[in-house]
Every structure is written in structure tokens, then in C-alpha cells.
């Protein structure tokens, strides 16, 4: 095992400096030379049968040593994380400080750590914020009329005779029993109006519930004083960028053309998204800690059923993502949902 020294750095990062004994480093010499001998061709020799001396001469000792370093540090890094109980996130930044045959391998690794989340009194926060943000499900007559007119407006046929003489505003279809029956399973205008109002009330309630839950988690995160590593923010920014690219391309547009249209670069968009990215990271960390603290997790059956549901709506999903990645995604989504239900509000 490597002799190492671990130093805490700003922004939730650590630096691991050390050396791997020459015996451990050189243990990879023969395997690397053998692999390179099999992967390359050498005139006068069958594949995999060239003597070590020929392989080293043709491939070059430096190239062999760097391949050895890559293999040695790959396993050593994992061992270091396990031995020192380091919960690292993101890709490590590895620098070789000394590399030579029959000598110790010197290295320096900088990596981000999963920040420690010390939850405040989240039950009290949930109760307080919950009381301050009750469900909203009242639909005013003005809101109802506006929604109904929007529906009527969406059914206007593009004909020249549907404009008034006074202005160019289209004439809305008359709200009759016959008209509402063309919109769906409605008995008459009264039935249509009542059902629209119920749907609007449900949407309002769901929206207020979602906003309340976000407010609770945000408040918990603020009081937890979480030190968010740059690596997590950068990872979240990449996710946000990928999401936007997907949305733009789903509309049949090219993302590069979109950037030209809005006169921004990807870098400028990332800068503008910094605060939102930090909020998303903080949200994920708080939910993760709450799930662990309260032992909240979906059942295997629920995970399986949700995967089946997703596959039914997108038969090509299995080709887009591996089973392990799909299970991980579904588990995270279901866990988040369970935590939201638990926190809103917590029942003593």
C-alpha cells in the first residue's frame, strides 16, 4: 500500500500525495509488457510471441512505465478511498511526481469529497414551512373564465369570416352544449365548466404542494451550511446543459443555431446557471441525507414496476441505457418522491 499524506483543500476538495513502493509498481511490468506484445505486431514474430526485449525496444520503456502507472494508481486509488473512508465524487485529477523503472511511483491526486451534511431540526422546519405554505386550490371566476376562453380560442378555425368588423380579434366559438361535447366527455356547458374548475383546482393544489416541498428542502439545506464542491456544481451544470440540448433538439432545432440566436456561448450559460446548479446540488444532498437518516427507500417491486412502466412508454429504452443505469435512475426518482412525501409535513 502507498505511503500517503492527505490534505484538506478549499471548496470541499482534498489532495492525496504519496508513493507506491517499487515492488508494487514493478509487479505490473510483466503483465503490461505481455499485453502490449499481444496488442502490437512485430516483424518476424507471431502475435504475442515477441521476446520482452523486442517489445520494450519497439514500444519504448516510457510508454510501458506510464501504462504501469495507470494500472497501479487505478487500484491504489480505490484502496486509499476504502482504507481512509473517503467518499470521493467526480473524476480525480492525477499527477505523477516520480516515475522510473525499479523505483517507487510518486503521485499527487486531487479529488472532491462528498460533503458532510449535518441536518438541522428538519422536522421543525418542515412543520413551520409547511404551515406557512398551505395548499392553494381556490379557483376564482376570473381565472375560470380566462381558462375557458383559452380553450375556446384554441378551437378557432383559421377562416377569414371569424373576425369582427371593429378589430382583427377572432370571434370565439359560442359556448354551447354542442360545442363542449366536441371537446370531450361533457354532458353540457355546466358539466364542462365544473370539470374544468376541478382540474384547475387540482393543478393549483399540486403546484402549491411542489413549491412547499421545495421550500422545505431549501430551508433545510440553508441551515445545514453545506460546503458544496466545485466538482458537483460542474457536474450539475453539464447535466443542465445536456437537458437544454435535448429540449432544443426535440423541437427539431440545432443547439449551435440556438446559441447563435440567443447570442450566448455554453460557457456564458453555465455562468448564468451557477446559482441554480448549486441549489440543485444542495437539494440532492439534503434528500440523500434524509433518505439515509430515515432509511427511506423504494421496494424492489416498486423499482421493477416503474421500469416496466417506462419500458412500455419507450420500448427502445433498454437500448439507450444499461439495466444497472436504468435501475439507478428509477431508484433515485422513487427515493426522491418518498422523501418529499415524508417531509411534507412530517407527522410526529
Image: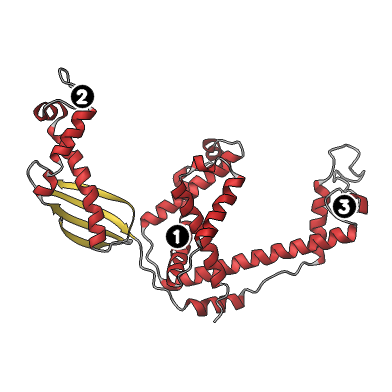
| Cβ atoms at labels 1 and 3 below 8 Å apart | no
Using a 10 Å C-alpha cutoff, classify the residue at mark 1 as few (fewer than 14 neighbours), some (14 to 19) or many (20 or more).
Answer: many
Tag 3 residue: 180
Using a 10 Å C-alpha cutoff, classify the residue at mark 3 as few (fewer than 14 neighbours), some (14 to 19) or many (20 or more).
Answer: many
Q: Which of marks 1 and 2 is in front?
A: 2
Gap between marks 1 and 3 measured at Cα: 46 Å
Tell me if 104 is positioned left or right of 133 in this view. left
Q: Which of marks 3 and 2 is in front?
A: 2
* Secondary element at image label 3: helix
Tag 1 residue: 281
Q: Where is residue 70 in the image (x, y as percent from the top left)?
A: 22, 43
Which residue is located at x 23 percent, y 56 percent? 79
* Secondary element at image label 2: loop
Mark 3 vs mark 2: which is more N-terminal? 2
Which residue is located at x 50 percent, y 41 percent? 320
Tag 2 residue: 47
Tell me if 123 is positioned left or right of 25 in this view. right
Which residue is located at x 66 percent, y 64 percent? 206
Q: Quadrant of residue 189?
A: bottom right
Residue nearest the viewer, comparing 149 with 113: 113
Residue nearest the viewer, comparing 201 with 307: 307
Coloured how?
Answer: secondary structure
Q: Check residue 91 in the rendering and tell me which mark sits there, or answer none.
A: none
In the rendered image, which quarter contains the C terminus?
bottom right
Q: In which quarter of the image is residue 223?
A: bottom left
Q: Would residue 209 be visible to someone looking at this image?
A: yes
Q: Residue furthest bottom?
A: 348
Mark 1 vs mark 3: which is more N-terminal? 3
Q: Where is residue 154 in the image (x, y as percent from the top left)?
A: 80, 47
Gap between marks 1 and 2 measured at Cα: 50 Å
Q: Would residue 109 be visible to someone looking at this image?
A: no
Amino acid at each position: 500500500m502507498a505511503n500517503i499524506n492527505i490534505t484538506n483543500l478549499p471548496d470541499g476538495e482534498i489532495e492525496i500525495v504519496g508513493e507506491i513502493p517499487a515492488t508494487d509498481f514493478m509487479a505490473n511490468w510483466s503483465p503490461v509488457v505481455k499485453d502490449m506484445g499481444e496488442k502490437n505486431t512485430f516483424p518476424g514474430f507471431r502475435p504475442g510471441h515477441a521476446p520482452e526485449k523486442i517489445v520494450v525496444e519497439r514500444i519504448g520503456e516510457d510508454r510501458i512505465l506510464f501504462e504501469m502507472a495507470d494500472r497501479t494508481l487505478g487500484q491504489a486509488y480505490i484502496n486509499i478511498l476504502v482504507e481512509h473512508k473517503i467518499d470521493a465524487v467526480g473524476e480525480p485529477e492525477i499527477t505523477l511526481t516520480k516515475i522510473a523503472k525499479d523505483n517507487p511511483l510518486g503521485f499527487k491526486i486531487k479529488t472532491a469529497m462528498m460533503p458532510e451534511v449535518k441536518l438541522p431540526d428538519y422536522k421543525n422546519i418542515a412543520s413551520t414551512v409547511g404551515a406557512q405554505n398551505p395548499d392553494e386550490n381556490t379557483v376564482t371566476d376570473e381565472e375560470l373564465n380566462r381558462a375557458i376562453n383559452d380553450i375556446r380560442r384554441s378551437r378557432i378555425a383559421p377562416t377569414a369570416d371569424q373576425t369582427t368588423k371593429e378589430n382583427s380579434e377572432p370571434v370565439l366559438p359560442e359556448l354551447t352544449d354542442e360545442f363542449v361535447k366536441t371537446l370531450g366527455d361533457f354532458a353540457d356547458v355546466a358539466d364542462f365548466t365544473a370539470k374544468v374548475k376541478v382540474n384547475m383546482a387540482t393543478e393549483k393544489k399540486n403546484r402549491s404542494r411542489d413549491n412547499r416541498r421545495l421550500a422545505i428542502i431549501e430551508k433545510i439545506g440553508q441551515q445545514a451550511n453545506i460546503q458544496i464542491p466545485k466538482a458537483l456544481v460542474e457536474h450539475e451544470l453539464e447535466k443542465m446543459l445536456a437537458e437544454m440540448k435535448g429540449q432544443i433538439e426535440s423541437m427539431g432545432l440545432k443547439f449551435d443555431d440556438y446559441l447563435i440566436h440567443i447570442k450566448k456561448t455554453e460557457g456564458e450559460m453555465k455562468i448564468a446557471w451557477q446559482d441554480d446548479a448549486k441549489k440543485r446540488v444542495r437539494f440532492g444532498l439534503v434528500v440523500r441525507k434524509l433518505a439515509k437518516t430515515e432509511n427511506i427507500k423504494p421496494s424492489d417491486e416498486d423499482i421493477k414496476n416503474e421500469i416496466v412502466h417506462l419500458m412500455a412508454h419507450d420500448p427502445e429504452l433498454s437500448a439507450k441505457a444499461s439495466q444497472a443505469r436504468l435501475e439507478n435512475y428509477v431508484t433515485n426518482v422513487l427515493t426522491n418522491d418518498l422523501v418529499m412525501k415524508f417531509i411534507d409535513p412530517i407527522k410526529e
